[in-house]
Amino acid sequence: MNFLLPLTGSFAQPAGENPTVAMIEAAFAHHGLDWRYINVEVAPEHLGDAVRGARAMGWRGFNCSIPHKVAVIAHLDGLGQSAEIIGAVNTIVRQGDRLIGENTDGRGFVTALREVVDPSGKSVVLFGAGGAARAVAVEIALAGAARIALVNRSIARGQEVVDLLNTRTPTQASFVPWEGPFVVPPDTDIVIHATSVGLYPDIDAMPDIDTDSLTPKMVVADGIHNPPLTRLLKAAQARGCRTVDGLGMLVQQGVIGIKYWTGVDADPQVMRQALLALDL
Ligand code: NDP
């Protein structure tokens, strides 16, 4: 017998509402991996100690969520390509004695999106310029999106992401200030909502988008995972659009993380079912 189990986990604050542990441990169990994923609440002033602790205890890797995604970089030994461009890390991978930071939020999103549409060559409207939107924007651009119109309330934050896209990726990005109901241009292929509007408990909140401008040829994706069927996605489905929900993004970033840590291709359906069983 070997009673020394490989450890992974998550550092965040608050951590109590983070459902990641349920889907990761469901995948570990399904694939016969006797690993553990420990959900830990870490205050910002203790982040360095927490990372040194994970190092000392030989953790195989861990996730970082709010508010640690940028601050953790100072405690790591290197970054993956897209994490370096995005400037934020949500998955840490141990390679020998080194801790490498990766960003799987955007890649998870693109994997979920590809089940419905390939973003290569497409015209995209993206709402938001926070951490999630930044990761999604970079990965959509690296996946070959032809054009990205980034719509955000704060001009400075939006313009910063657009500048990043135009200098570090091949896409053509433009900024549109979000003033009043946004009319989606008819030549748009993919509409992505990546703000926090509509997140539990404000589930009746609706991003200020003129849903009459959505057409059946558009794919509409929402980053909100709780609830999975947001008001925006309901409106898009009523207009005949194909949709991608935020659970897809959450599950697929977990699949990428498990692959980094264990080498195993985890079954996304098992992980999605584990999240749905929580009745988010
Ligand atoms: P941030 O706080 O970094 O960014 C919030 C974004 O929402 C900003 O663009 C902000 O605009 C915008 N926003 C907030 N309130 C409003 C409003 N009333 N009207 C218009 N815009 C608004 O958050 P994150 O980027 O980290 O997270 C955003 C969402 O993505 C969260 O709901 C999170 O749960 C979800 N997410 C989902 C993941 C998944 O796996 N499904 C992974 C990561 C995040 P402004 O700049 O003007 O303030």
Image (tube, rainbow, N blue to C red):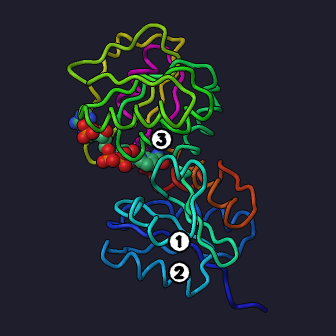
Instruction: Check residue 236 in the rendering and tell me which mark sits there, or answer none.
Output: none
Viewer-nearest residue: 136 or 210: 136
Q: Which residue in the structure is indicated by mark 2? A: 54
x, y percentage for residue 61? Answer: 59, 71
x, y percentage for residue 149? Answer: 41, 22
Q: Which residue in the structure is indicated by mark 3? A: 246
At label 1, which amino acid type do we have? Gly
Judge from the rendering whether residue 1 lies leftward or rightward of residue 226; answer left or right.
right
Mark 3 or 2, which is nearer the eye? 2
Between discs 3 and 1, the one toward the N terminus: 1
Q: Which residue in the structure is indicated by mark 1? A: 9
- Cα–Cα span, label 2 and label 1: 9 Å
The part of the chain drawn in magenta is 223-245
Viewer-nearest residue: 182 or 27: 182
Judge from the rendering whether residue 47 lies leftward or rightward of residue 77; answer left or right.
left
Q: Is residue 226 magenta?
A: yes
